[in-house]
Image: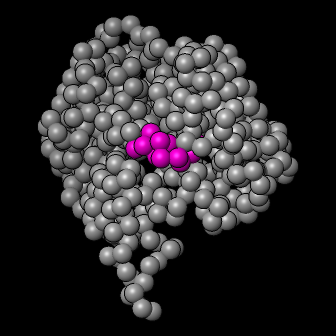
Amino acid sequence: MVGKLSQSRLEPVLQLKGIVKRFPGVVANDRIDLTLFPGEIHALLGENGAGKSTLMNVLYGLISPDAGEIVLKGAPVRLESPAGAIARGIGMVHQHFMLVPVMTVAENVMLGLESTRGRFFLDTARVARRIREISSRHGLAVEPEAVVQHLPVGVQQRIEIIKVLYREAEILILDEPTAVLTPQEVEDLFEILRSLARSGHSLLFITHKLKEALALADRITVLRRGRVVGTRRPEETSEEELATMMVGRDVELTVKKRPARPGRPVLSVQGLWVEADEGPPAIRDLSLEVRAGEILGAAGVQGNGQTELMEALAGLRPPRAGRIVIDGRDVSRATPREIAELGVGYIPEDRQRDGLILPFPLEDNLILNRYHREPFSRKGWIQREEVRRQAETLLQAFDIRASSVTAAVRNLSGGNQQKVIAARELSRPIKLLLASQPTRGLDVGSIEYIHSRILEARDGGTAVVLVSTELDEILALSDRIAVLYRGRIVGLLDAASADRTHLGLLMTGAAA
């Protein structure tokens, strides 16, 4: 890899020179310079709204820059579409997989670049041979005839990489590629990426995980508010310095919490069965108890019932069987409002579908669960001054970045949308907090703040159920950890003594 070589002896494979991209009222990229060398893994870090995604969209041809130049192998180029980027050897592995579940691996890989026999028949055998060649060369163990929907998440990630390599990409952009992987799958992915770099591919690795950037990258570039604030080699920096560069202030990276003092049971789940949208039940005969003043973390690979469990607890998905008792009341058939009125806060996994009304202004989204109560409503009339006062307070407290409290929430970045939900749910008295991916899409500074508020709620006597694909988050915040696999709890551990490797094996069913 280039980190082991002298860059002065290498010609850059890619140069971004003075890239500027403006949107109404915002300069997303402000004269950004970035250089990528052959065989280099270059990590890109930055807080919400720093301009990382905009810059990668410029490079992949999804949007055009307002100023600046892209130089590819020494020659200036204009990238006006993803097809143009692919034709020039640039491929992108998206955070959310772009796969058709009912198709085979080979069919997914050839989509848009179909190989045929004669005029009418797909040549899947030829594509399968090519996939095996790529797999063998880079350690991407994938069976071309397998149907995608039956494959683990880690294997689906490999398919996305194979798709890019099949199109002969030499530069790979990877957008948060570890977001839904177990620790073992992350290590496997890193070995694959190192193999690609050794073979001469150049990688741009977008991540918000400081440990990953330090472990994998040859160089790390940090963006803040649309500008490059510095580039470091891993051996020259630390998590603390990178975090400070990202947010412009010192950040407490270690979660500090007092020992839990569990009280009475607040949530009791007994013999719960919950249906999935299709296929077998998502939750199967699950029982658990959460007490006041403790955090129960639910760990598991995405798709093992965590989503359906939280929706059932919040009243969004009626259980098929079993009981849900909150604060002594059976709420198995209660509505979401009835559950919220009991003092239950809910941070949903899908913020846009379940957490926000996107066309509504930010100020209204901040009172969705209490607009009908004083001081926001009197005799059926919304009290606009109170609503606005509340919104201004929460904007400042949670560092929500918006042009005004009357801006439509759909115009906010994903991270700021997440802050709106967290602010709404954590700014009122609650007995139970259901937090599903509470820091997804947030930068280190915002994560620090949300973590502190969750712990503050716990220390104040709130019972918390935490679902996160981030194992570090589960280990840092939880007092007890329940591991879910195929809708069942396969392990219940004390967080203080939990072992990452054992947790990872439980999450994949290997130790179940």
Q: Residue at x 69, y 43 (%)?
A: 12
Q: Residue 134: x percent and y percent?
A: 39, 58
First to last magenta residue range: 192-204
Q: Nearer the viewer, residue 493 or 503?
A: 503
> Which residue is situated farthest in the top direction here?
258
Q: Residue at x 46, y 77 (%)?
A: 114
Q: Residue at x 14, y 44 (%)?
A: 285
Q: Nearer the viewer, residue 304 or 325?
A: 304
> Which residue is situated farthest in the front direction here?
9
Examine the image and state in which quarter residue 391 appears: top right
Q: Is residue 314 visible?
A: no
Q: Is residue 494 left or right of residue 27?
A: left
Q: Nearer the viewer, residue 439 or 421?
A: 439
> Which residue is situated farthest in the bottom direction here?
119
Q: Residue 35: x percent and y percent?
A: 70, 39
Q: Residue 250: x percent and y percent?
A: 63, 13
Q: Residue at x 38, y 72 (%)?
A: 127
Q: How many marks?
A: 0
> Which quarter of the image is occupied by the C terminus?
top left
> Is residue 193 magenta-colored?
yes
Q: Residue 141: x percent and y percent?
A: 30, 53
Q: Is residue 435 visible?
A: yes
Compared to 203, does 288 lie above or below?
above
Colouring style: one colour
Q: Is residue 304 left or right of residue 338?
A: left
> Is residue 310 magenta-colored?
no
